[in-house]
Amino acid sequence: LKNNLRDAIKKIVKSSGIDEELIKELSKNVQRALLQSDVNVRLVLEITKQIEIRSLNETPPPGLSRKDHIVKILYDELAKLLGKESDFDFKSGKQNKLIMLGIQGSGKTTVTAKLAKFLTKQGYSVGVIGADTYRPGALVQLRTMCEKSNVEVYGEPNNKNSPDIVKNGLKYFESLPLDVILIDTAGRHKEEKDLLSEMEQINKVAEPDLAILVIDGTIGQQCFNQAEAFHKTIPVGGIIITKLDSSAKGGGAIAASAATGAQIMYIGTGERIDDLEKFSPTRFVGRLLGMGDIQAVLDLAKRLENEGDDVRLKRISSGKMNMDDFFYQLEEVTKVGSLKGFLDNMPGLSGMVKDDQLDQMEGRVSKWRFIIQSMTKEEKADPDLMNSSRIKRISRGSGWPEHEVKELLKNYKNSKSMMKASKGRQMQGTLRRMGFG
Ligand code: GDP
Ligand code: MG
């Protein structure tokens, strides 16, 4: 099934002309992939109809080929469904209050602790209020999870009145220089009336700046009703989907977003405290389609268009990368907006570039461009030819000191030997993850 979608995209990319049949086929395969990922049928039909109509009728903007345009439409429409990346908009000079909504077991307490750590690491000072008076040990669970990030948790183990606890907690934190207060709440069975009325009371007391709905990403279509019920009681401002560990698809999450009009902000990807990721529409689309990051797919699609690049990728992944290949990858990397996500898909570079080095990349690329341009054809094809007199010549020709030339050569060699050592395993893994392997 996955392969069908992969093949359909490949077919579009490789075909000399686009016809209606090809577009229908793509649309069918997108449909299947989305339905399999638990996306609501109505939404699926809407979106694929849109893909068909636009693909058949729109004229590609100048500079974009018809195929590129179709892949882009596919992406656009899927991304529209998911909205944009969105993040907290904390006001400075006040304590921003965030309240967690969601049924029991959805992951509120875990998310609270994860966020407490995440925000602390970003430099915010955070306080937490534990207002779950139902689950025995709820407060201990929260304290244990927050302990390591040194976040204080306010709680009253013997008080059963949760709105009261929230009120006292806010008062307790009032005099402290906190930026954010996270309020963890109880949550019992599905849409239970008592739960909702309790939430309503807590909401009145807390006057939160943001209510976050925490939803278990494995529950599929039920997301819609759950989200709607909460939203009617307390307006939901943001959504966090949990349990999207590697195998979960999470298409139901879209329903939660549709029911509330709120954006998915973060996703939980495991039980550990650091298993929290910013929600990325492109990655999520990829997940829904079973294709890894769709951004990488789009870029790969571009590269596939050109048979020469195909050959190049094979050469790189088999450990025979030459200087041109090396530079080609550098250029690709700096062209892409989101470097981080893309680096994994550059087999000859991943590992060489650490997150904090990303900024330096662009400077390097423009520098190295001059250096590589000063190399002869033979030197580029076989950088092992390099010796000190050649390095001297290249240095003079490029206007960069010899140590810069050596730096480039060292990086090239490292990348190449890394590729050799992994014998392309990494590349194949990457392609497989993207659904092309
Ligand atoms: P709450 O009742 O809403 O507070 O839910 P909890 O935070 O107590 O989480 C319920 C269960 O789900 C716990 O066993 C958590 O470890 C687990 N859990 C929470 N988030 C995730 C996640 O992202 N992935 C996985 N695999 N488990 C999670
Ligand atoms: Mg809890």
Image (cartoon, grey):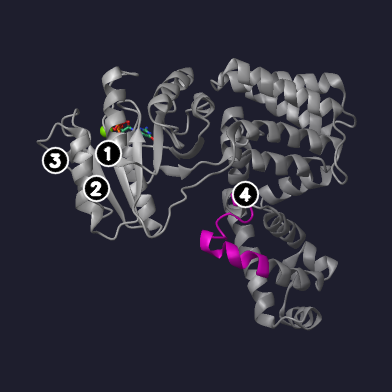
- Residue visible at 61% across and 22% down? 34
CA–CA distance in space, label 4 to label 1: 45 Å
- Of mark 4 and mark 1, the one earlier in the sequence is 1
Q: Position of residue 283 (x, y in %)?
A: 58, 39
Badge number at residue 205:
1
- Of mark 3 and mark 4, the one earlier in the sequence is 3
Q: Are marks 1 and 2 in contact (CB under 8 Å)?
A: yes
CA–CA distance in space, label 2 to label 3: 13 Å
Q: Position of residue 47 (x, y in %)?
A: 68, 24
Q: Is residue 248 left or right of 211 when viewed as pictured?
A: right
The type of residue carrying mark 4 is Phe
**Residue that label 3 marks:** 156
Q: Secondary structure at mark 1?
A: helix
Q: Position of residue 8 (x, y in %)?
A: 74, 26
- Residue visible at 78% across and 23% down? 52
Could you say which quadrant of the image residue 272 lies in?
A: top left
**Residue that label 2 marks:** 170
- Of mark 4 and mark 2, the one earlier in the sequence is 2
The type of residue carrying mark 3 is Glu
Badge number at residue 388:
none
Mark 3 vs mark 4, foreground winner is 3
Vertical comparison of 86 with 162: above or below? below
- Of mark 1 and mark 2, the one earlier in the sequence is 2
Vertical comparison of 147 with 194: above or below? below
* Image quarter hosting the N terminus: top right
Circle 1 crowding by C-alpha within 10 Å: few under 14, some 14–19, many from 20: some
The residue segment tinted magenta is: 343-363
Q: Secondary structure at mark 4?
A: helix
